[in-house]
């Protein structure tokens, strides 16, 4: 029995639909019309002899076969793209100084940077982890070529990648947060910190009394303090350790705003190595945050 060679473009369309949540947005991403993207999915279904989507109310969701194909599609595309970048990357030279916040340095982004380094052996990549505001200060001083930053989307050099919800965070298993007659204990970064400011403003507007019980300049220290029960904090949902959990309105806490995740490049910074690194960061943000 001869097996079909699955259409790579169709697999890419399938993954894009799941990442972006709609056929229309996926078609825009891959540079095709909506009807052409739909035809690609039908071709893939024909090759496999199985429907990949089924109707659920007004929405289309993956069938069991679709779930299976989607998981393989991501792996196939990752290998394809890594191979293509590896061959192309051998001709790319230069140096890139990249900065990012700890929220992403402790999760999937270092692995992506490692893949970039293997695919571009002639490129020197210097990576540093800093707080968001500090990253931009150093970018403006010419110490970075590219930074990934949360909360500063109003800058003219901001390239918006995703909008992330802020969330209250406490120790895993937390049931009660607010206690009658007692202020809420907070664990926060030292100022200036836009998460700190957003949390305090939300509590003040909701008339929830609070006190600063734990202050730090380190994300790892912040997570440790929260896990120890010294106070609750707030960040995005990216990179929350398993020892912690999201808190919310069911715990009596007020809603929080969203935060923009952006790339910022140094003025005039332009070289093939920088462009390749930007693409790797954007692809991994899209793949892991579903933007």
Image (cartoon, helix red, strand yellow):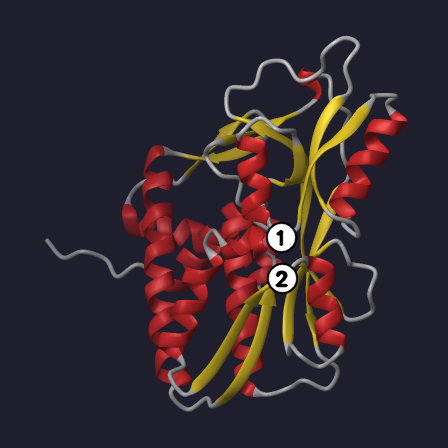
**Disc 2 designates what residue?**
130
Q: Where does the image place residue 288, in percent across and percent down from the top left? A: 50, 51
Looking at the image, residue 92 sits to the left or right of residue 176; the answer is left
Task: Single out the mark in the foreground, 1 or 2.
Answer: 2
Looking at the image, residue 275 sits to the left or right of residue 120; the answer is right
Residue at the extreme left of the image, as rendered:
1
Asked if disc 1 and disc 2 are in contact, CB closer than 8 Å, the reply is no
Residue closer to the observer: 222 or 264: 222
Q: Residue at x 66, y 51 (%)?
A: 217
Residue closer to the observer: 162 or 4: 162
**How would you rate the neighbour count of disc 1 (Cα within 10 Å): few for under 14, some for 14-19, many for 20 or more?**
some
Q: Where does the image place residue 189, in percent across and percent down from the top left? A: 70, 45
Q: Residue at x 38, y 54 (%)?
A: 74
Instruction: Determine whether 20 is above or below 253 in the image.
Output: below
**Disc 1 designates what residue?**
25
Instruction: Determine whether 225 is above or below 229 in the image.
Output: below
Residue closer to the observer: 68 or 260: 260
Looking at the image, residue 233 sits to the left or right of residue 38; the answer is right
- State the separation of the CA atoms marked 1 and 2: 34 Å
């Amino acid at each position: 029995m001869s097996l079909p060679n699955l259409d790579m473009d169709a697999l890419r369309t399938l993954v894009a639909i799941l990442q972006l949540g709609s056929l229309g947005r996926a078609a825009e991403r891959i540079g095709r019309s909506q009807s052409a993207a739909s035809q690609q999915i039908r071709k893939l279904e024909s090759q496999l002899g199985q429907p990949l989507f089924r109707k659920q109310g007004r929405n289309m969701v993956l069938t069991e076969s679709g779930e299976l194909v989607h998981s393989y599609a991501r792996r196939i595309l990752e290998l394809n793209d890594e191979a293509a970048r590896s061959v192309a990357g051998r001709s790319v030279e230069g140096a890139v100084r990249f900065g990012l916040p700890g929220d992403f340095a402790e999760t999937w982004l270092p692995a992506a940077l490692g893949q970039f380094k293997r695919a571009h052996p002639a490129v020197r990549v210097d990576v540093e982890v800093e707080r968001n505001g500090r990253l931009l200060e150093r970018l403006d001083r010419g110490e970075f070529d590219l930074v990934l930053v949360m909360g500063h989307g109003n800058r003219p050099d901001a390239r918006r990648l995703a909008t992330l919800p802020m969330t209250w965070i406490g120790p895993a298993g937390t049931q009660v947060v607010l206690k009658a007659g007692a202020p809420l204990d907070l664990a926060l970064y030292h100022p200036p910190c836009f998460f700190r400011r957003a949390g305090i403003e939300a509590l003040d507007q909701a008339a929830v009394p609070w006190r600063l019980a734990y202050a730090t300049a380190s994300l790892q220290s912040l997570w440790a303090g929260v896990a120890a029960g010294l106070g609750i904090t707030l960040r995005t949902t990216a990179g929350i350790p398993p020892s912690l959990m999201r808190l919310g309105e069911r715990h009596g806490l007020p809603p929080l705003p969203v935060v923009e995740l952006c790339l910022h490049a140094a003025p005039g910074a332009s070289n093939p190595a920088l462009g390749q690194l930007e693409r790797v960061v954007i692809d991994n943000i899209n793949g892991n945050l579903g933007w």
